Image: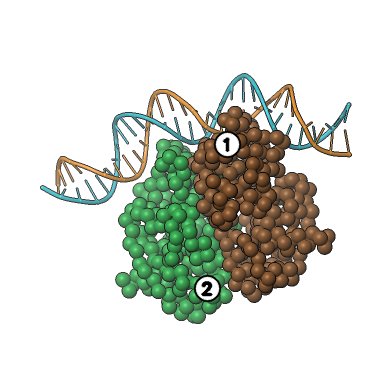
Chain colours: A brown, B green, C cyan, D orange
Amino acid sequence: MTETRRLAHERLIQGLFAKADASITELVQGLPVRILRLEPHQEIVTEGQRMREACLVLEGFVCRHKHVWKDQRQILSFHIPGDLPDIQSLHLPTVDYSLSALPASTVALFPHAAVRMAVEASADFREAVWRHALIDAAITRAWLASVGRRTAYQRLAHLFCEVFARMLDRKLAEAQGFVLPVTQSDLADALGLSTVHVNRTMQDLRRSGVIETRGRFHGFTDWVALREAADFDPGYLHLPEETLALLT
Amino acid sequence: MTETRRLAHERLIQGLFAKADASITELVQGLPVRILRLEPHQEIVTEGQRMREACLVLEGFVCRHKHVWKDQRQILSFHIPGDLPDIQSLHLPTVDYSLSALPASTVALFPHAAVRMAVEASADFREAVWRHALIDAAITRAWLASVGRRTAYQRLAHLFCEVFARMLDRKLAEAQGFVLPVTQSDLADALGLSTVHVNRTMQDLRRSGVIETRGRFHGFTDWVALREAADFDPGYLHLPEETLALLT
DNA sequence: CGTGTTATTGACCAACATCAAACTTAGTGG
DNA sequence: CCACTAAGTTTGATGTTGGTCAATAACACG
């Protein structure tokens, strides 16, 4: 467990900073942290809840979602290790969404009070938290544009590009492809489609020869074509040059 | 023009704080500001642009939008007087969306440098800016849920409820209804629908007896029914109690 | 093996898009 | 005050994307 705590501090740094300087490392390692292991589909946070801790994804895959009308749900975002899906609860403690693990996952919980102290102590830390929250908002806007104005084919392609790019940046993906540990029904809820249609659209993607699926690993057989079909421009992710270079 | 500058400071306070204390008022009134008058449809900010000022809506109605694929656009948010649609450019200067006036509008521009100083000088101001940016993100999430999982009828109803609630809070609407100064084609781009379908759906709303339109004024003839059709819960707007009371 | 979850298929249907035209309104200049 | 124009709204006819329902097939795991 001490091992996992170390991982939590490491991942926090990885998620917030391109490169950590010594003072930041020290600051982060001083943060108290609680580890939570989650079953598949387990809910961590519920819409309307008042938070006292902020969550960091350590392993697995987490999503934000909202329940809409009769048992329909919309997934609002996917979160990979290193993400802080509810960091904004620091300033707006009542959350407007639920948070759930998709496959079995593990998350770290940092008390708001401690994070607030770190934020006040270090301008770099403060800046990094802002950046993280704002990129998150930019991603939500990209999703809104996708769901509002793209076809199912384009939406799915765009989602693949985005999640791949983000995972690549955190060294969670190979250049040739990546593991997306979610079901087709999760994808449907993320893209505003039905499960059946996601299934058919996936088949279209495979038939077009841009993606090859083996289980939950998705290999890119024609990255340029995928990127173009999706009309994907990674600008909104504000990735470092090194990562962007890998997405050419 | 000096008159308009005063208005700018006043609206900034109104947009950021429920009630202003004296020190905040002083701080805000010290901010340098530039006024811009906009023609209908005039673009203020363009996707990818690097900002050095932050925009505050003074009069009219402004929207954020993204261009998607062949001349399609998705409106990401509407902004009413008192809103800071691109305050996040303070920390992420390259914006991922465009900003346009819908009807003729006027906006104030505050230099980033000055705002940054105010943010550093006052914890209350800093907190208020965070709050503003985070509520904005919550609104985007609500839109995503709407576009992803609601029918045209529900989406339109939800949008009416939301914008009305926000305008009410800023004293920009009467209890019986409000002026929404946008075209049906703007609504279509906001809701991910076609203009024709928005038109037909508006007629449905009128036929159901929940809304009555005279020009761009929309009167609520059955608020409770509208609210229920939209499945509208204003929690995500984080409005003060007084305003919530008016939405019962 | 059996049991539960996920993926895939087929038949049919509904919501919403597209296209093209007519109508309304508000603004403009003579 | 009236034509003239441009923008926005409304209508009808028709097409398509994606939804629903229901069944079957493929896995994954104890």
Q: CA distance from mark 2 to mark 1?
A: 47 Å
In this rendering, position of residue B130 left or right of residue B164: right
Q: Mark 2 = which residue?
A: B119
Res A222 quadrant in image: top right
Mark 1 nearby-residue class (10 Å; few <14, some 14–19, many ≥20): some
Residue A177 x/y as whole percent = 65, 41
Closer to the camera: disc 2 or disc 1? 1
What is the chain identity of the residue bearing mark 2?
B
Q: Quadrant of the C terminus of chain B?
A: bottom right
Vertical side of B9 occupied by B209: above or below: above
Res B196 quadrant in image: top left
Res A137 quadrant in image: bottom right
Residue C11 x/y as whole percent = 61, 19
Q: Mark 1 = which residue?
A: A222
Q: Which of A102 and A43 lies nearest the eye of the viewer?
A: A102
Q: Is residue A208 visible?
A: yes
Q: Which residue occupies 44% across, 62% down? A: B51
Mark 2 nearby-residue class (10 Å; few <14, some 14–19, many ≥20): some
Q: Is residue A51 visible?
A: no
Q: Which residue occupies 41% across, 47% down? A: B186
Q: Which residue occupies 68% across, 50% down? A: A172
Residue A7 x/y as whole percent = 76, 60
Q: Quadrant of the N terminus of chain B?
A: bottom left
Give amino acid for label 2. Answer: Val
Q: Secondary structure at mark 1?
A: loop
* Callouts 2 and 1 on one subunit: no
